[in-house]
Amino acid sequence: MSEMPAIPLIYIQLAYLVAAVLFIAGLKNLSSARTAPRGNALAAVGMLIAIIATLLMRGVVNYPLILGGVVVGAAIGAVLATRIQMTAMPQMVALLNGFGGGASVLVASAALLGGETIAASVPAWAIVVSALIGTVTFTGSLIAFAKLQEMMRGQPILYPGQQFVNGIMGLGILALCALVALQPEQVPAFGALLAVGLILGVTLVIPIGGADMPVVISLLNSYSGLAACATGFVLGNSGLVISGSLVGASGLILTKIMCDAMNRPLTNVLFGAFGAVDQTAIAAAAGGERPTVKAYTPDDAAIVFSSASSAIVVPGYGMAVAQAQHAVRELMDALEERGVKTRFAIHPVAGRMPGHMNVLLAEANVPYDKLVEMDHINAEFPETDVALVLGANDVVNPDARSAEDSPIYGMPILNVDHARQVMVIKRSMNPGFAGIDNPLFYLDNTMMVFGDAKQTVLGIVEALKEV
C-alpha cells in the first residue's frame, strides 16, 4: 500500500464540476439519435474525469487493489460489449441497473459495519436510503433480466393478497429504516432491512408483464441513479451525488414520457398486472369466433411494393427476435432504388426498452433521418401506399382508439390502418404482450404474410428483383 501526495480539495471539486457539465451536455445530446454518439462520448469523458479526481482524494490509498478491479471490470465489459447481440441489449441494461444497485448496497453496508471511524462521520439516513433503493433495484433488475431473457414467463405472476403482502413489507421496511437511522449500531435491524428490500424488489416486478418492460427498465435505471446519489452522501463524494441525481432525474422523466405514450399512469404499470392473459377469451377466439384472414406470400408482397410510391415500415419486437434489422435495411435500399420513398415509424414503447428500435436500425446503418417519431408520422399514413408492420402488435391495434372495453383503450398508436395497403409480417396469429386480438389483421386493406421476419423480408427483396 502506498499513499499519493494530497491534492488540494479545490482542484478535486473543480474536476467534479467539469464532469458534471459534461454529464449534462451528454444527456442533452442523447435526446437526438443523430447526436447520441457525441453525447455518449461526452458523458464517458466526464466519468473518466470524476474517477481520476476520486482516486486523487486523500483516503484512497489501496491503488493496487483498485487497479486490479479496473482490469477485471474492463475485461468483463469488453467481452460483453463484443459478444452481446443488439437484440439482447434490454437484458444487458437491466443487468447493469442491478449491478449499480448492488454496488450501492455494498458501500452502505461497508459504511455501517466499518466501525466508529467510518460510520460516525456518515449520515445514517444516507446509509438507509442507499441500502433500501439498492436492494430493491438489485433484485428487481434481476427479475426484469430473467423475464426479458425468457428464463421465466413474461406474463404477470399473480397470487392472492399480493398487494396486501407488498403493503405489509413496505410498512416493515419503513419501521426498519427508522430504527437503523436512529440507531445505526443495530446491525441485526440493518440485516433485516437488506433482506426485506431484496424480497420487495422481487415482489414488485413479478406482477409486471412483458409489455411494460420498457417502463420497468427506465424506472429501475432511475432507481440505480438515486441509489448512487445516496451513496455519494455516504462517501462524501459530490461527483457521485451529481451523477446519481442526473441519472435518477432523467430516468424518472423518461418513465413519465413512456407512461404518457401508453396513456397509463405509473401506478397502473406497477400494480395493474397489465398483460395477464385472459385464457377464457383466448379459448373463445381459438374456437372460431375470430374472422378469417388470408395468407399472402413474399411474391405477393413484392408485387404490391412494385406499384407503390411511398412506404412506412413499423418495426416491433418480432423484428428484434428475428434479428431482421439488416434484412430490413436491404428492403429499404431495394425500394428506394425503385423510387419508393421509405421511412420508419417509431413508437415510444416498441420493443423491450426505450429506444430499442432506434438502436437496432442504427446497427443496420439505417440513416437517422429515416426514423420518424409517432407524433410526426401519424398524419402521413393516409397518404402512404404501403405500411409494413414487422412484428408489432399492440402499438398498431385500432382498438386503442375505439374499443372502450379494451385494456389498451386510449393508448396512442401508430395509425397504420389509415394507409392504402397494410402488410403485416408475423409468425402466427398469437396475440402480443397485452394478450388481446388485433382487428387490424382482419381489415380489407390488410394482407398477412406469415413467417420469420428476417427470412420473409429477404424473400420480398429477392422477389422485387424479379418484378
Image (spheres, rainbow, N blue to C red):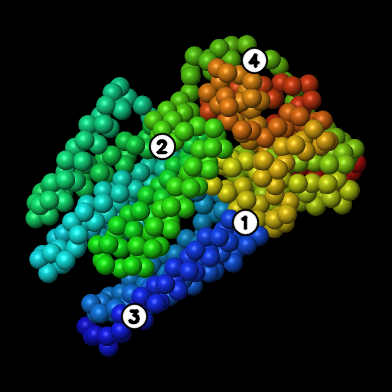
- Mark in the foreground, 3 or 4: 3
- For image coordinates 36% across by 81% down, the residue present is 11
Q: On the image, numbered disc 3 is attached to which residue?
A: 10
Q: Amino acid at mark 2?
A: Met
Disc 3 residue crowd, few under 14, some 14–19, many 20+, Cα 10 Å: few
Q: Nearer the viewer, residue 161 or 27?
A: 27
Q: Amino acid at mark 4?
A: Arg
| C-alpha span from label 3 to label 4 | 71 Å
Mark 4 or mark 1: whose residue is earlier in sequence: 1
Q: Is 120 positioned to the left or the right of 319 in the image?
A: left
| C-alpha span from label 3 to label 2 | 51 Å
Mark 3 or mark 2: whose residue is earlier in sequence: 3
Q: Is 388 positioned to the left or the right of 204 in the image?
A: right
Label annotation for residue 290: 4
- Mark in the foreground, 4 or 1: 1
Q: Is 379 positioned to the left or the right of 140 in the image?
A: right
